[in-house]
Image (tube, helix red, strand yellow):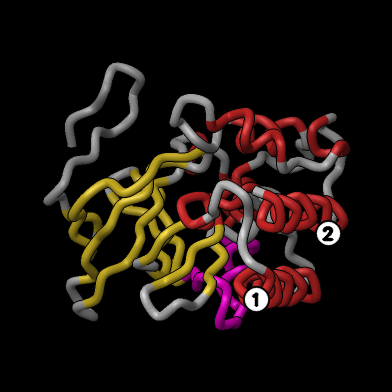
Amino acid sequence: GPTRGNGEVAIEPGQQLLHYRLIEKIGEGGMGVVWKAEDTKLHRHVALKVLPPSMAADPDRRARFEREARAVAALSHPNIVTLYSVEQANGVDFITMELVDGRTLTRLLPKRGFPLDRLLGIAIPLADAVSRAHRAGITHRDLKPDNVMIDGEGRLRVLDFGLAKLAEPSGSTRDTRAATVTSDTAEGQVLGTVAYMSPEQAEGKEVDAGSDVFSLGTILYEMATG
């Protein structure tokens, strides 16, 4: 395909990667660009996340990425978005995952917070999803209202589990921070993301489940108070 000046392959709507046809760009984050795509074999829509080119360049990183992606894909939970596969086509690395049609917690959160019953209706499945991942040894690393969606049926879905971890080169702690801080390109969003970070993550230290619990606490506080 056509390349941009920086050596990246330019990706356009209508383009086909394997049996996935790109429909429209739906987001952009530290982990790459997210597309709504059609799986032409299974005739269903998926979210397709194009990974940074650096991923493919390093075979060790690629192997570790696939291993960790398999662990995330095995997370079967009604409130966690399913990761389907890790693919490679025309020099492009990408992940396919379940496409959630809904609204983010960022958009749903009232100025002064939710009434108690609504808060509990969101907080319980959210805590349950995070707990399930932690039991499987997977840390989210970028929990924030933008990564929590309520779908058309009113069901809570947590996006991007473990993906910030997958994005870093092995043995690196600094890159997690960089990926998280820049994960939202909208102006003014950067500070928001930093606001959900545990102190150890902000300092670029090793991050574990406790860091997610810190972020979760921050989200719950915001849900209660706005």
Q: Look at the image and say whether residue 73 sits in the magenta stretch.
A: yes
Determine the residue located farthest toward the left in the rendered image: 14
Q: Residue 29 location, x and y as percent? A: 47, 40
Q: Tell me the magenta residue range.
A: 66-83
Which of the 4 quarters of the picture holds residue 171?
Answer: top right
- Amino acid on which the number 2 mark rests in the picture: Ala
Q: Residue 192 location, x and y as percent? A: 62, 35
- Amino acid on which the number 1 mark rests in the picture: Asp
The residue at 73%/71% (across/down) is 127
Residue position for label 2: 209
Is residue 136 shown left or right of residue 113?
right
Viewer-proximal residue among 158 and 39: 158
Q: Residue 131 location, x and y as percent? A: 77, 73
Residue 165 in view: no
Task: Kindly identify which numbered label has been placed on residue 203.
Answer: none
Q: Dot 1 lies on which element?
A: helix
Relative to 116, say whether 190 is above or below: above
Q: Residues within 10 Å of mark 2 (few under 14, many from 20)?
A: some
